[in-house]
Image (tube, rainbow, N blue to C red):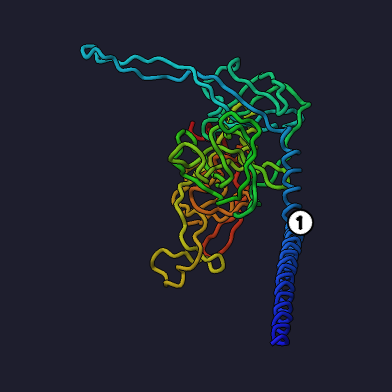
């Protein structure tokens, strides 16, 4: 019995020691597991950091582009008198009184260089109806600029402000014609008066025309669409590519709320500079005249010259619509002098492919008059090149 009792005691001691060892081992395993988890997390952080290096390089380039651009962007504030309609309560008079109220509008502009002098390019609606003493233009570091003269064009909603300077930081111009849908762009402006705000997005579409904008006087439209945040106050500011080059002038938004909903529009810089140069040199935009009536040419096969008018085979349905079909050539017009004929399909104008009739009208109207322009025409399944000398539209109507 004694032996048995000792055996039980020893067995109990061994069991207790075994239990303590198992507990210690469990704690040790738990500690090792925690350490292993921490080590894995550390490795994941290091892996993430290495994978982020291309993004960080892109962000570094974006920051550099913003630093280069900022000195070329100006802040604009304009105080205007806007009419307010008041209806008389006296029914016997049945007249309305017109009074005005003072409103303040903020916007932006970009410094451009033309013939060695510096000007501010902006939207007309930013400074429209405001007197020069009621317009404030200041640089990115808050230095006010003196306004010498303002020249405007309602048909494109562009304005050039002469600040009488040639020592400012001027922007670098990009080529809006080479922009591609999906390309990254950023907008700089003064949304809600917060000057020099930057927003990033992509080019959503190109060649947006016939938009129902608030100011219906914008006749010539060829907008770049972007999802970079554009709000009231961004008007007149530049749309930039990641090289720091201006590719557009932010002009309008499509919105039910009046604020950014991801659909903004910018005037391509090639169009804007063509207008700005004329405003500076001539004081107005002199629209050119070709002298044709055109309609959209559907489903033209550029190889065979066949056009689907509904009579050809369905195989032609796959051809992309392009060009403008000449329906009328006006007498004594530049088109008649160049040899354009009824039935010609204008495929190119001044080296630019003609998308449709509206596109051709836009390009002709915005091309400087007194200039020789080359046309590529599809005539009886043959490509023909013609030269036309454009005249001012006003002179052609006299």
Q: Is residue 391 left or right of residue 14?
A: left
Question: Which residue is pictured at 45% across the width and 72% down the height?
Answer: 315
**Residue picked out by circle 1:** 53
Q: Residue 267: percent from the left, percent from the top? A: 58, 41
Q: Quadrant of the N terminus?
A: bottom right
Observer-nearest residue: 293 or 386?
293
**Residue at the (46%, 60%) spot, across then down:** 298
Name which quarter of the figure residue 281 lies in.
Answer: top right
Residue 354 lies, in percent from the top left, at 55, 53
Residue drawn at 61 percent across, 23 percent down: 150
Find residue 252 and report its horizontal and vertical position in percent: 52, 38
Residue 159, by quadrant, is top right
Circle 1 crowding by C-alpha within 10 Å: few under 14, some 14–19, many from 20: few
**Residue sitting at 66 percent across and 52 percent down?**
178
Pick the residue in front: 26 or 239.
Answer: 26
In the displayed structure, 186 sits above or below 393; it is below
Residue 398 in picture, x, y percent from top left: 49, 31
């Amino acid at each position: 019995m004694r032996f048995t009792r000792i055996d039980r005691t020893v067995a109990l001691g061994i069991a207790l020691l075994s239990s303590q060892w198992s507990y210690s081992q469990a704690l040790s395993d738990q500690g090792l597991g925690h350490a292993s988890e921490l080590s894995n997390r550390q490795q994941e952080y290091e892996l993430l950091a290495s994978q982020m290096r291309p993004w960080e390089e892109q962000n570094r380039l974006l920051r550099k582009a913003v630093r280069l651009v900022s000195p070329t962007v100006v802040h604009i504030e304009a105080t205007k008198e806007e009419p307010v309609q008041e209806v008389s309560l006296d029914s016997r008079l049945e007249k309305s009184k017109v009074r005005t109220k003072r409103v303040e509008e903020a916007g932006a502009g970009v410094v451009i260089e033309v013939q060695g002098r510096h000007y501010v390019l902006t939207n007309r609606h930013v400074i429209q109806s405001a007197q020069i003493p009621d317009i404030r233009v200041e640089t990115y570091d808050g230095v006010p600029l003196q306004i010498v003269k303002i020249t405007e064009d309602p048909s494109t909603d562009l304005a050039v402000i002469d600040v009488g300077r040639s020592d400012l930081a001027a922007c670098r111009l990009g080529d809006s014609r080479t922009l591609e849908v999906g390309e990254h762009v950023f907008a700089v402006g003064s949304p809600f008066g917060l000057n020099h705000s930057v927003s990033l997005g992509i080019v959503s579409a190109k060649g947006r025309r016939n938009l129902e904008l608030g100011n219906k006087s914008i006749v010539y439209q060829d907008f770049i669409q972007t999802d970079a945040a554009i709000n009231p106050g961004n008007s007149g500011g530049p749309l930039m590519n990641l090289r720091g080059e201006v590719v557009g002038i932010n002009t309008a938004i499509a919105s039910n709320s009046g604020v950014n909903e991801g659909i903004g529009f910018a005037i391509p810089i090639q169009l804007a500079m063509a207008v700005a140069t004329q405003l500076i040199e001539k004081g107005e935009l002199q629209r050119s005249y070709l002298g044709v009536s055109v309609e959209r040419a559907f489903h033209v096969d550029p190889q065979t010259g066949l056009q689907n008018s509904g009579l050809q085979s369905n195989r032609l349905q796959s051809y992309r619509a392009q060009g403008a079909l000449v329906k009328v050539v006006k007498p004594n017009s530049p088109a008649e002098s160049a040899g354009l004929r009824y039935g010609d399909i204008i495929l190119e104008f001044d080296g630019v492919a003609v998308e449709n009739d509206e596109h051709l009208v836009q390009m002709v109207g915005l091309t400087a008059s007194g200039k020789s322009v080359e046309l590529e025409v599809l005539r009886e399944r043959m490509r023909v090149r013609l030269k036309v000398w454009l005249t001012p539209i006003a002179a052609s109507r006299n």
